[in-house]
């Protein structure tokens, strides 16, 4: 592979994300003016103050990159504080983007390029950079005061401490102000366009199409045309600066990726999930009702769905988490696709209502965008430590199916799958996404709408007893689902509740044998949910080690596996999308490998379930840093495990 | 059959007249013998046919507590949910199904303690719900602890030396929470109870009806002064729209110079100054003053009837209007167009 960074082992393919034929495609091509180098992939990180607009800058660069046709993966990383004190380490916000001419899986371990808008951004991110990485700094922000604020005794731009990197000193603020001197804007407003100057410079460096950004800025600031023009001017000035200044001698070309045929767009997990819910509503014919309370990192789903009322979507911002799920359950009783969206602390509050939905046996989707815990934890950082809460976090025996997407785009399919299970089996379903999937994005091949599965609500329309009566708990013998009779259906009036009910009639019952039967039946219904078999990727068929993951660890695990295989190792990989019930073949899969390693961003929750259910010595590899795994790190762990096996066995 | 109730204009009409019997289920009613809930149940069952709507379009939703068993005895759709959450669940149902008549049955513990938050937010949103709050000023189902409406100093199982909590006045709370309809009635006065239910059903939006209900096991006689023939005329103030507020032999309600209400003997001299009841006053000040009129210790001069009944847009109607407006402005949702968005590229 060809890296922009030449000295670094860390970026030189060790994360498993290099392209297979990169050497052949690399090279330096010439055009009049500056030389252009061809690369197969690049990792860029924009970093600045929370108020510097780094998320917007990253989003725009991502859109340009998607429009260009590269494969990509993103990692926004920002503090929970809206505006942490300016210039401080806690206030640093960053956006990392990995893009390539081939299929990639992660936002990348180590950036090739860091754009640091101030000393805090440099200090907070430097440790992640490999030697030889390029650093672009806004020198205007490297004042004595700003340096002192983050504890720099000497100016790192001048003391030689950055000698291992390729440093570009750019007075971004001055250049932006100079470009906007005729704009008539106050200095403060003009200065705010410096992120667009930086975006323009990077867009030049990587040959990004610029039309989309200019259109975007005109639309975003439609009501403030002066601001729109200033941002566009700054953006163009940044581009022209790259073109003319000698500091940037080379620009880079990353050809489009060869993805499977189709129409693509870039999509984040929360957006994909929102669309999946709307699609589920369409494909089931049930109106969508979202009851939700704002919580990071789930609120974007509430925002998104509230914009699509022309799809018959009702969004209800409740007074609290409990009312959010309560309203969704009430709507489900009335025949809607009831959904509540939240994060871990919200699930804790909703537990009692989830239990009620288990007892009522009504369809309900509970979407948990997991974040760092316990308690308030790390609101803007990712984690997957709510698995056991989803599995067991209720009083009594209250089984709930669990679905977990592996990538941002897969959140779309997960929403449809969760709706299918909920509606078919009349049960609440937990959908476990996380902060990384929610905010990260990737290209998505847009499905044809008629390719999407249909979901049959199969409402009860008439009596189900020979005597003309209706029993609300008379079950389908195949699925064990009870009839869903909605108010307004004549002759099927019935009462349901959280008190134990008699099998069949649904009348209140305290009978011991009936309770035992009902508890076992509710469990059997969930155990009997049909889920696809687990697919195992074992290329040679003779691997001895299986790495098994779930959720957002898919990208780094797969990248690590690719790397090990490139080094000649045999390793099998599988990823669970259904965590309750598990796929029917899971036990057999686990038993067919000598060793099973389960990497998780928790302290071993899936591993605990596997060990309990299958008596298998699944071994955990854990990290709870609020960030996704690094592929290189996982590759080391897996490689060591393979080494042990080979040492043991041969 | 009466004319359609305004709040029920979207609910399908019954094809033939119904009777109280149609609203009874085959379930054995399991309240304690002598409980005030029996009288309320009978009054409600007898009242429902008056609405003239299809039984299958009627839903009763309750929380937890003695009163919350109510839905099991109503031959309509019903849900006995969890403690305090009935207003939230009913909000989701009412907001998504304007063709239903949705009733919430709750108690003083359910509505005002564990479910206080949902109650106040339902009231301020003005969802089309009728909330029947059975107030017996005690926890019955958990066997006799004090409730949020129990009087200060009350001796109960959990307060052997007397309760330290100042009680809520449910109707003051409701008026403060921007309720558009606030009324009070008594379990034992069937005619009055039904007149209040009628007014509540007529109201567009959330109606809160507090029903004084006797718990003969844990708080017997709590409202006896309002029921006893010897005392009730002096204790009860029956509010009637557009009429001067008079009660007992010769007493009435007046507005003092400070704006507050007070009770006095009515004479020829002051008769013209009697407060004329108008539940439709836009300002909640008089309704609030009426909620405070009763003597907290003796319950003397307790107003019953409709204290407040004003018009404000209904939440579920507004929600439906937004859906219609979005469809008019943006066209009916096109899933393929949504999934494509504005930035796509094609790989051949």
Image (spheres, helix red, strand yellow):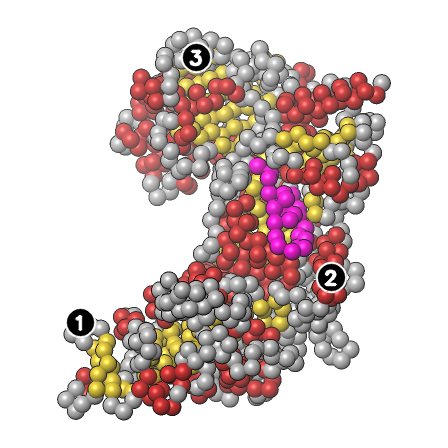
Tell me: B7 left or right of A466: left
| Residue under label 1 | B258
Q: Name the subunit of mark 2.
A: A
Q: Nearer the viewer, residue A130 or A221?
A: A130
Vertical placement of residue A372 versus A365, above or below: above
Magenta highlight: main SS: loop
Marks 1 and 2, how far apart in space?
Answer: 65 Å
Magenta stretch in the rendered image: A383-404
Q: Quadrant of residue A147?
A: top left
Sequence order check, earlier mark of 2 and 3: 3
In percent of width and height, residue B104 lies at: 50, 71
Please report, as a chain letter, where disc 1 is located: B
The answer to whether B248 is drawn above or below residue A35 in the figure is: below
User: Which quarter of the rendered picture does the N terminus of chain A lie within?
Assistant: top right
Q: Nearer the viewer, residue A130 or A134?
A: A130
Image location of residue A559, percent across then percent down: 67, 27
The residue carrying pointer 1 sits among few (fewer than 14), some (14 to 19) or many (20 or more) residues within 10 Å by Cα, namely: few
Labels 2 and 3 in the same subunit: yes
Callout 3: residue from which chain?
A
Residue with the most extreme left position: B269
Q: Nearer the viewer, residue A333 or A18?
A: A333
């Amino acid at each position: 592979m060809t890296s922009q960074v030449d000295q670094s082992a860390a970026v030189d393919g060790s994360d498993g994300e290099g392209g297979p034929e990169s050497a052949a495609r690399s090279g330096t091509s010439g055009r009049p003016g500056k030389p252009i180098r061809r690369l197969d992939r690049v990792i860029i990180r924009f970093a600045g103050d929370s108020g510097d607009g780094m998320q917007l800058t990253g989003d725009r660069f991502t859109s340009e990159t998607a429009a260009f046709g590269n494969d990509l993966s993103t990692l926004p990383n920002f503090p929970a504080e809206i505006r942490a004190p300016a210039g401080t380490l806690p206030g640093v916000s960053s956006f990392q983007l990995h893009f390539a001419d081939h299929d990639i899986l992660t936002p990348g371990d180590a950036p090739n390029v860091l754009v640091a808008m101030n000393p805090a951004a440099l200090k907070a991110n430097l440790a992640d950079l490999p030697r030889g990485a390029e650093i672009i700094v806004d020198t205007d922000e490297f004042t004595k005061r700003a340096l002192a604020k983050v504890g720099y005794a000497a100016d790192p731009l001048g003391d030689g401490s950055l000698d291992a990197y390729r440093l570009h000193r750019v007075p971004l603020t001055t250049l932006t102000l100079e470009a906007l001197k005729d704009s008539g804007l106050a200095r403060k407003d003009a200065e705010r366009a410096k992120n667009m100057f930086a975006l323009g410079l990077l867009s030049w460096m990587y040959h990004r199409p610029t039309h989309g950004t200019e259109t975007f800025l005109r639309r975003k600031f439609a009501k403030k045309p002066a601001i729109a023009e200033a941002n566009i001017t700054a953006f163009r000035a940044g581009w022209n600066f790259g073109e003319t200044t000698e500091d940037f001698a080379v620009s880079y070309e990353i050809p489009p990726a060869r993805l499977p045929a189709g129409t693509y767009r870039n999509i984040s997990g929360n957006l994909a999930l929102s669309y999946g819910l709307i699609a589920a509503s369409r494909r089931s014919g049930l109106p969508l009702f979202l009851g939700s309370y704002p919580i990071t990192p789930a609120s974007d789903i509430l925002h998104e769905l509230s914009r699509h009322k022309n799809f018959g979507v009702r969004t209800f911002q409740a007074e609290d988490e409990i009312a959010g799920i309560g309203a969704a359950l009430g709507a489900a009783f009335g025949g809607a696709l009831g959904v509540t969206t939240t994060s871990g602390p919200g699930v804790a509050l909703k537990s009692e209502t989830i239990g009620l939905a288990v007892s009522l046996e009504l369809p309900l989707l509970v979407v948990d965008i997991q974040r760092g815990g316990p308690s308030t934890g790390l609101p803007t950082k990712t984690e997957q430590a709510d698995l056991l809460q989803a599995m067991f976090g209720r009083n009594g025996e209250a089984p709930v199916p669990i679905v977990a997407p592996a990538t941002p785009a897969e959140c779309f399919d997960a929403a449809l799958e969760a709706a299918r299970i909920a509606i078919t089996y009349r049960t609440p379903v937990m959908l476990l996404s996380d902060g990384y999937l929610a905010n990260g994005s990737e290209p998505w091949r847009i499905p044809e709408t008629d390719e999407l599965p249909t979901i049959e609500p199969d409402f009860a329309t008439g009596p189900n007893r020979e005597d003309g009566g209706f029993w609300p708990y008379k079950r389908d013998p195949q699925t064990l689902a009870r009839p869903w009779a909605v108010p307004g259906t004549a002759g099927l009036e019935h009462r349901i509740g959280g008190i134990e009910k008699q099998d069949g009639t649904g009348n209140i019952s305290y009978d011991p044998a009936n309770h035992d039967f009902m508890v076992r039946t509710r469990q059997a219904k969930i155990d009997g949910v049909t889920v696809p078999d687990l697919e195992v990727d074992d290329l040679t068929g003779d691997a001895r080690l299986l790495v098994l993951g779930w959720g957002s660890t898919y990208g780094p695990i797969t990248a690590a596996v690719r790397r090990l295989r490139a080094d000649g190792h045999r390793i099998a990989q599988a990823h669970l999308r259904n965590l309750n019930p598990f796929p029917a073949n899971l036990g057999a899969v686990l038993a067919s490998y000598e060793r099973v390693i389960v990497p998780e961003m928790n302290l071993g929750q899936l591993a605990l379930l596997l060990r309990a259910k299958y008596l298998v010595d699944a071994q955990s590899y854990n990290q709870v840093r609020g960030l996704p795994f690094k592929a290189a790190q996982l590759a080391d762990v897996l490689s060591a495990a393979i080494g042990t096996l080979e040492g043991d066995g041969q | 059959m009466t004319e359609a109730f305004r709040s029920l204009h979207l609910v399908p009409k019954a094809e033939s007249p119904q009777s109280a019997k149609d609203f009874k289920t085959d379930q054995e009613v399991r309240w304690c013998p002598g409980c005030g809930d029996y009288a309320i149940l009978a009054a409600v069952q007898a009242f429902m046919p008056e609405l003239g709507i299809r039984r299958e379009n009627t839903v009763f939703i309750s929380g937890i507590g003695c009163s919350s068993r109510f839905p099991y005895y109503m031959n309509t759709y019903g849900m006995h949910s969890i403690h305090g959450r009935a207003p939230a669940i009913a909000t989701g149902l009412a907001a998504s199904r304007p063709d239903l008549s949705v009733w919430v049955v709750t108690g003083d513990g359910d509505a005002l303690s564990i479910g206080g938050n949902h109650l106040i937010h339902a009231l301020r949103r003005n969802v089309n719900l009728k909330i029947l709050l059975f107030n017996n000023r005690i926890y019955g189902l958990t066997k006799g602890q004090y409730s949020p409406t129990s009087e200060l100093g009350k001796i109960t199982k959990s307060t052997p030396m007397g309760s330290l909590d100042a009680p809520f006045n449910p109707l003051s709370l409701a008026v403060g929470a921007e309720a558009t309809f606030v009324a009070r009635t008594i379990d034992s006065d069937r005619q009055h109870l039904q007149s209040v239910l009628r007014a509540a059903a007529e109201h567009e939006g959330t109606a809160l009806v507090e029903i004084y209900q006797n718990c003969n096991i844990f708080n017997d006689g709590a409202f006896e002064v309002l029921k006893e023939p010897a005392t009730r005329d002096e204790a009860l103030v029956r509010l009637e729209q557009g009429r001067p507020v008079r009660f007992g032999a010769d007493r009435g309600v007046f507005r003092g110079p400070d704006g507050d209400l007070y009770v006095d003997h009515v004479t020829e001299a002051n008769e013209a100054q009697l407060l004329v009841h108008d539940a439709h006053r836009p300002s909640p000040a008089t309704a609030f003053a009426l909620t405070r009129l009763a003597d907290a210790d003796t319950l003397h001069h307790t107003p019953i009837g409709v204290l407040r009944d004003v018009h404000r847009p209904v939440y579920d109607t507004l929600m439906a209007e937004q859906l219609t407006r979005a469809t008019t402005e943006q066209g009916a949702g096109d899933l393929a167009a949504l999934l494509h968005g504005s930035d796509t590229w094609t790989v051949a």
